Amino acid sequence: MSVSELMQTMDYGPAPESPAEALDWLAGHGNRFGLFIAGRFTEPRAGVEARNPATGEVLAMLTAATPGEVEDAVAAARRAQPKWAGLGGAARARHLRALARLIRQRARLIAVLETLDSGQPIRESRETGEAQAERLFHHHAGLAQLLEQDLPGHVPLGVCGLILPSTLPFVMLASMAAPALAAGNTIVLKPAERTSLGALLFADLARAAGLPRGVVNVVTGGVAVGEAMVAHPGIDGIGFAGSAGVGRAIRTAAAGSGKALGLHLSAKPPVIVFEDADLDAAVEGAVEAMCSRGPAGGAGARLILQEGIAGDFLVRLKARMAGLRLGDPLDRGTDIGALIDEGQRDHVAALVAEGAAEGDLFQPDGALPGRGAFHPPTLVSGLASASRLMQAEVFGPVLVSTTFRTPTEAVQLANDARHGQVASVWSETITLALDVAPRLAAGVVRMNGANLVDAAGVGGLDGLTAYLRPEGRGRGKRLKPPAPPRQGDPLARAERLWIGGKRVPPSGGQARAIHGPRGQVIGHVGLATREDVQAAVAAARKAQPGWATQDAQARAQVLCTIAEALSARASEVADLLRTMTGAPGAKAEVAQSVERLFTWAARAGTQAGEIRPGPIRGTALAMAVPVGVIGALCPDEAPLLGLVSVLAPAIAMGNACVLVPSEPCPLAATAFGEVLEASDLPGGVVNLLTGAHAALAEPLAAHMDVDAVWSFSSADLSAGIERAAAGDLKRSWVNHGRARDWWGAEGEDRAFLRAATDVRTILIPWGA
């Protein structure tokens, strides 16, 4: 074809990237890989084939780890961990910087190998793979350097098991390995079965960077290997990136184990386009979300379009999709590469066929390559929010769309998925965009941009704390479960429940006697049921949005009025505490409870977000937003102080809560309900349900309208709560039946602040 003909058609010419360097690296290992344990590769065995999904060619043979080999990897990591942590942050930073330099030097090898292994276009491998991985290690080297100064009193978790996804495997490896290593943990990596080569190359780089033996270990294989890691008692923390279904299974399996969990769950990110948006730019953002393998669109994307521009937008989008290039992932002009394997391609095709029966299907004309796991770019418009294709993780180049009329409706549609990672808002009206962005249930919200996420630029210390624990915390003495309640007078008048700002009788009409330290009956309380949990959660859900929209100073003033009302009744409440417990410190407990309320009033009025450097010409605004509705089992050992210590941070940060007070000493909560009556707290923000912790824990933890569940109960209910909370992937914070120092700093530390808030990072670009 002549130059003049090319100028007429403007067709792309081929621009292939040579695979020679990656193939040479594979050949240097004999195209066979063992496991990487204690600084060396084990003898390879036949196990799993690594195939190029674009051609079907076998790249290498990988070893499937046995349970014994997982044990060996964990043991090697355990042996290496004390020395690695003992090096100190500055020494670990030097190792991480060495790794970052090697990633930069071997950037082309990493990108080509990832493209061969996963089928993603080479352009994406270069731009979002090695480049972000290098920045992540440099960034966390800096955090490691400052760790002792910025986070004193924190120690590593120990050994972390990291389970990687098949999409963007190298950058996701870096996003979990860098903070884990910076914090002083050693790691056992388990890459996705079909995309393991990048993790094995990382092992080579870690060895070349001089990391001590056992600090990095890699075990390959299928689901059984991941299950063995989750169940292993020698692993202190699990990091997982992948589908929500697998994440739910991991949370269920790890329930009650005490392992720290960090789940990076894929979802269909919402792309909200308002009628005043730059439509051409928004179309490019939608296409990037469709083509991206990362959090911007790895599981597909949901277009949420304002009705007035939906038709025009879809016309422009279809024209843009018709020009996308699908083909050889190693060609630098390719927009859409191959899916991970033929099974995934067939799964995507089945989901699209189901969605096409409910909406309007568009796929550009053009033949697919003759071989490989390719799927055409697809748009299905006019779907209802409940449609399976609208909700399901697709992991293919598929866009779905629906429409909205008002900003509130757009937020509701966008939040119709609990575990969102990212979202984008397209509007030229900054006041509108900044109003909508914090209300979206997503960790990162982009304004007028698509692939702006750079974890090195927006993570700060937040990501590092997931791989640390406070020194000496969480290892308190084992609590003694409360004694079974004794029979009381069934005709006695019982204290009522506190729901929606009113005293109401328990729905079951049941009560139990409360006995003093000498066995005397000192009162009766109602026994809450599942129906009462439903009513209390409904009241909290109704009250929470209005409470959260009050400014921080207004919430602080309400907390101050509660503190003052409690102080005014200090003598009466102290006498009640003394009668229930027989302990001499009742007066001090009331005084400490008053001070704790004032402490959280101060934090409510002074808590602020951050401006962080971002990877864009603009800024990253990190905002702490309320979790929503929190259900909590309060401690038995400090009936009033424990209740206040749980309640105060929750409502100070804008949450509503459903609290189950101390089981043996619940009369402190009923007295506190009278204090709430004398305050300015809106009805429904705090709800108090007396009864057995064991009976109320599961209904609270499993309730779909509860956003987080906490347990400080003396009864060891942690495993059951974590299993129930895994059903809808809500946050859980449990004590595993161990005591907390409610009188000291542990009773009001920043762990409560982190548990009561989510951080929204809003990326705001600027410039003409």
Image (cartoon, rainbow, N blue to C red):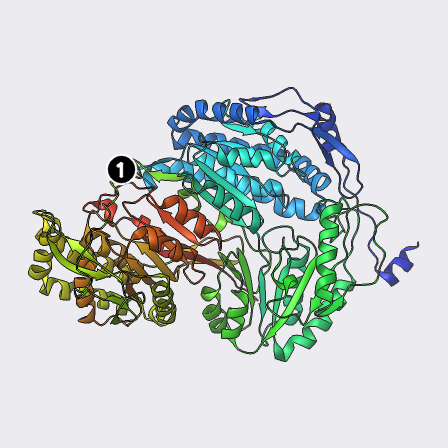
- Quadrant assignment for the C terminus: bottom right
Q: Is residue 460 visible?
A: no
Q: Residue at x 39, y 62 (%)?
A: 628
The quadrant holding residue 169 is top right
How many residues crowd mark 1 within 10 Å: few (<14), some (14–19), many (20+)? some
Q: Position of residue 272 (x, y in %)?
A: 57, 68
In this picture, is 585 found above or below 425? above
Q: Position of residue 97 (x, y in %)?
A: 50, 34
Q: Position of residue 219 (x, y in %)?
A: 59, 30
The quadrant holding residue 27 is top right
In this picture, is 212 found above or below 279? above
* Most distant residue in the top direction: 43
Q: Which residue is identified by label 1? A: 476
Q: Residue at x 27, y 37 (%)?
A: 478
Q: Position of residue 328 (x, y in %)?
A: 79, 46
* Most distant residue in the bottom direction: 308
- Quadrant assignment for the N terminus: bottom right
Q: Is residue 369 visible?
A: yes
In this picture, is 279 found above or below 340? below
Left or right of 385, for residue 638: left
In this picture, is 196 found above or below 361? above
Q: Residue at x 70, y 37 (%)?
A: 113
